[in-house]
Amino acid sequence: MDVYQEAVRYLESQHSPVVFEAETEVLEEDVFQEEAVSCLLSPLLPESLDFPDTPTLCSPTEMLARRLVLLKGILESEEVYLRELETLLTPMKALRASAGTSQPVLSSRQVQTVFYQVPEIRDMHHSFYSGLKARLTEPGPVKDGEMNYTGFGLVVGDLFLKMVNQIGLYGGFIRNYEEAVEVVRRCTLSHPRFRTLAQSMMPSNGSIKTQTKYTFEALLYKPLDRVTKTTLVLHDLLKTTPQEHEDHSFLQEALRLSRSFLSGVNESSQCKREVTLSRGMRRQLMRDGFVVDVSDGERSLRHLFLYTDLLLCTRNKPASKGSPDQYRFCWYLPLASLKLRWVADQERPPDAHLRLHTIRTKMHLLRQQLRQHAVCLCDKGVALAARSRKKLEQMELMLFTHSPVYTLELHSPSGKSHSLLLSSLSELEEWREVIDKLTKDNVETVPPDLLTLTSACVKLRMTQQPPLHSTHAVEDEKSLCGTLSVAVHSACGLQQPAPAYVCVEVDGYEFYDKQAQTHSSVHSLNPHWDQELCFQVDGARELRLLCVSQSGQRDSVLGKASVELDSKTLTRRWRRQTLHLGQVEVTLSLKYCPHPLDPPSAAAQQKPVFCVPLETLAQQEGVLVPHVVRCCVEEVERRGMDEVGIYRVSGSTSDIGSLKAAFNSNLREAVTRLRSAEVNVAAGVLKLYFRELPEPLLPTNIFQSLARTQEVQDMNLRLASMLSLLQSCPEPNRHTFLYLLHHLQRVSKKQDVNRMSLMNLATVFGPSLLRLPVVGLGPTMDISKEVVVQVQVVFCYLQCNNLPEAQTSRPHDTEAEDETTHV
């Protein structure tokens, strides 16, 4: 008897064609090449990994609509899976019949091994499929005169729980799986005719265009894939089932049983699934997430997997109908001796800003539409909401790809390098920390089976989609919608003096910029910024803070922390608190003003600094002493105190003009350039600022009064009168003047080196700080006498030994006592 011909005739009688290698009419895609059968590498789905999040919808009606779509998808998937199981079982009868002949292809024991538990699994899923199909096709109970197909009347949780209660059938299949695959492989090698059968199996129904050619091994892998997907599907279904629905408790229990089953399987066979590394360690997945990979100037969304000994970059191939999710291999880098470097991207070109602004504007409009549709509970409103949500997700995905500004550069000893872009400094730091820790362990890399490793990513994924806020957003009364103001005051605890800055990030919808940074401080153990940063937020729940040191040629994160945002506790009044970022403490204040948001505007230009009234500038910066004054003073005190003729010797006019323009357009960039400018240029910028004030620092209305005080012979009485006049000045003028006086006094203490006495400094600054009123608005004075008065007034103030201390910023703790957050 020709066993092969008998098997072929049997398959054909069951309408399951056997495809020979010469036939090319059907789709020649070997599914097994895309999803490796090895379960030796990684757990099916470790309990320690999170399940993919799914959209939590705004209303029960919308949730139930999405739930119905999900259930129909489950039904279609079950139908495909049953066809695959039937295809796998088709040759079983013929192989059993041949086992008793003189020329068996497989022995009876081998047939039992290959098909172990498959018929039982098929029967279990057939029962589930039949029950689910009946529930979805039959009308539900009548409610208010209408048939209820989609609402609370559709109950399917008992079907899922019944199926999961029999999931133990998969346990025997999984334990037997490796032996079954080995039998198929041996038989394929030893029986040429069986090889054609084993490598060319197709489902018996379905059109030629949709049919896929399977290998025997690929079909044996299907139950392994299915048992993992069952858990993921239960998780997704529970997310779309309102808590008050009858199914909710059934699905919760089914999910618990499914997770428990997978956990038990993983623990019992852990040693078989992992690759052994040096020092007895095993390869494990440490972290994964979506990043933007830059190659030849092109940005591509990638899914990055960090294992114990290597980084694997993949791209997701969307699953076609009836097919599993797949990953395509892009590149991998061993962690051994891997070098990391992160930098902020260069300024985006104007066309990039315009593209991002267009995307954000569309997102804002879609978000408004979504809120309107949520009010309407009719079928049309649900459909419109689903459409708007889909468009919003697409827009945010484009933004996710094109907006990142932080680059993580990876350099391998082999010469391979890759650049990854991330939109969040806190996320970049998390990646850097865990990679650094693994590279310091100096673990040897075991050359991976890339096909197997890439395919295993489907089982190990922690997220199915990039972390889009529009996908996971939930309407929450606590989330913020309006203006969030963050005043960053100071830091302490630095281990060594260094320039530093603070980066602030908020979450929520990406209609507006979600991160901002203070300017860089001078070299100090206790940096001060007193800088106010404002965010327009929609749906914000968390604020992240990072303190970054700029020592040497590279930036390094000194510490990071997060603050939970709650609209019920934040108010329109400032609230001061101290955050502990490891050894570094950062003091800041928060306030929140809720209001409807306008559509996002193009990137707002910074308001000018020079030639602006001091009170106006102080108001817009939220300080008492403008940043330009403080930054220039700090720079002179850092490296100009020993400079001969400081403030008297002029710096380069062109360099001073360039820095002036920078301060008028971008404070952060200006401060960075100031740090490397010649010190006399920094001094020149300070003098120019005071000289170009529309109203002098000491207001013109007290000029005559100050002039008369110079006639008082008693020095103590004169100073008392002058300090009294100073108290009458506006707060920003008074504190800025006091800040400058204290600085100039410190400069004069080094006059033996820099040759700048109090009189020299008064001569330089007097005409810039004090001026007569405009002609016609007060008594006139000869120009020479005016200069004498200007110098004498400033000289007298500089001689005062008990000048009041200057306050550089407005108080931000008007609501409550300081709060301290330990991180």
Image (tube, rainbow, N blue to C red):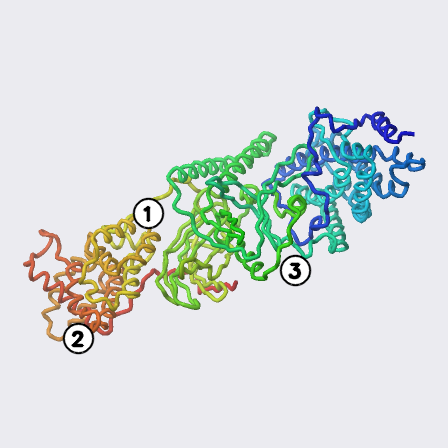
Q: Amino acid at mark 1?
A: Gln
Question: How far apart in space, not on screen, are marks 2 and 1 (Cα)?
Answer: 45 Å
Asked if the residues shown at circle 1 and circle 3 are in contact, with their CB atoms under 8 angstroms apart, the answer is: no
**Does residue 527 lie above or below 311 as drawn?**
below
Total marks drawn?
Answer: 3
Identify which amino acid the numbered label 2 is placed on.
Asn
Instruction: Left or right? Give the position of 700 relative to 452.
Output: left
Q: Is any part of residue 146 visible from this angle?
A: yes
Q: Amino acid at mark 3?
A: Ser
In this figure, which residue is indicated by the disc labeled 2?
Answer: 716
Q: Quadrant of residue 646?
A: bottom left
Viewer-side residue, 135 vs 162: 162
Where residue 98 appears, as percent x and y from the top left, is: 91, 34
**Residue occupying the point 28% across, 53% down:** 617
- Mark 1 to mark 3 CA distance (whole Å): 55 Å
Residue wearing tag 3 = 278
Is residue 130 visible in the rendered structure shown here? no
Question: Residue 606's mark?
Answer: 1
Q: Earlier in the sequence, mark 1 or mark 3?
A: 3
Q: Position of residue 23 (x, y in %)?
A: 73, 25
Label 3 packing within 10 angstroms: few (<14), some (14-19), many (20+) = few
Query: Who is closer to the viewer here, 718 or 488?
Result: 488
Give the quadrant of the N terminus: top right
Rendered position, 565 above or below 648: above
| Image position, residue 656 (x, y; %) | 23, 53
For discs 2 and 1, the disc positioned in front in the rendered view: 1
Label 2, secondary structure: give it: helix
Q: Which mark is first along the chain, 2 or 3?
A: 3
Secondary structure beneath label 3: helix
Q: Which residue in the rendered view is the most extreme toward the left?
A: 782
- Residue sitting at x 40%, y 53%: 517
Q: CA distance from mark 3 to mark 2?
A: 80 Å
